[in-house]
Amino acid sequence: MGVRTWIEGWPVYRQVTGADSFGRGAAVQSQVSAGLTARTATADTVVKSVCPYCAVGCGQNVYVKDDRVVQIEGDPDSPVSRGRLCPKGSASLQLTTGSARQYQVLYRRPYGTAWEPLGLETAMDMIADRIIASRRAGWQWEVDGPDGSRAVRRTLGFASLGGATLDNEENYLLKKLFTALGAVQIENQARI
């Protein structure tokens, strides 16, 4: 490659001699970047979603190709975020496709130092057993007060903290479930 070819390929030279004097377009593109195609351009579908990280609920456009998420960007139609995402929201593609994502239940035994894989059915049974045991151990039929005993029919053995990414219907069902189990400490991350 000659010196002249090298100089003509230099972005500053193209910016000074070309029509793009501010360096906002083709003048600053290398041959490699000029040949790239955006991941959003190759997507089959765009799905509207909500960022899963906090209670703000920023809108996201999830770009899908061949049933696989290829890009996640801010949704300009969202009245909450108007197309902007914080650094966590911008990195949410890693949540769906990252190499560190786990696709199995991991369990660490009490006083254990390592995680071990566990079957989903086993994990669900363990959770159900622990809820039942906590409910039995902490159940209160009545409490004594200054006016005598009062019926409460509740448990203080467990609580629920809902996530901000759940929609109204999911939060409604969680509230009903934990109320039916007798829990009184039911809260949502969106209020904290």
Image (cartoon, helix red, strand yellow):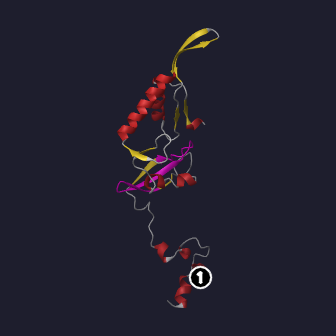
Q: Secondary structure at mark 1?
A: helix
Amino acid type indicated by mark 1: Tyr
Q: Which residues are magenta?
A: 49-71
40 to the left or right of 142: left
Q: Which residue is mark 1?
A: 13
Residue 83 visible at all = no
Residue 143 visible at all = yes
Rate crowding at label 1 as few (under 14), some (14 to 19) or many (20 or more) other CA atoms within 10 Å.
some
Can you give x and y, in whole percent of width and height, for residue 95 in the image? 47, 52
46 to the left or right of 24: left
Asked if residue 93 is positioned above or below residue 38 in the image, the reply reads above
Asked if residue 45 is positioned above or below residue 106 in the image, the reply reads below
Q: Residue at x 48, y 38 (%)?
A: 167
Asked if residue 113 is positioned above or below residue 41 in the image, the reply reads above
Q: Residue at x 42, y 47 (%)?
A: 116
Q: What residue occupies the far top of the structure in this picture?
A: 148
Q: How many marks?
A: 1
Q: Residue at x 59, y 78 (%)?
A: 15
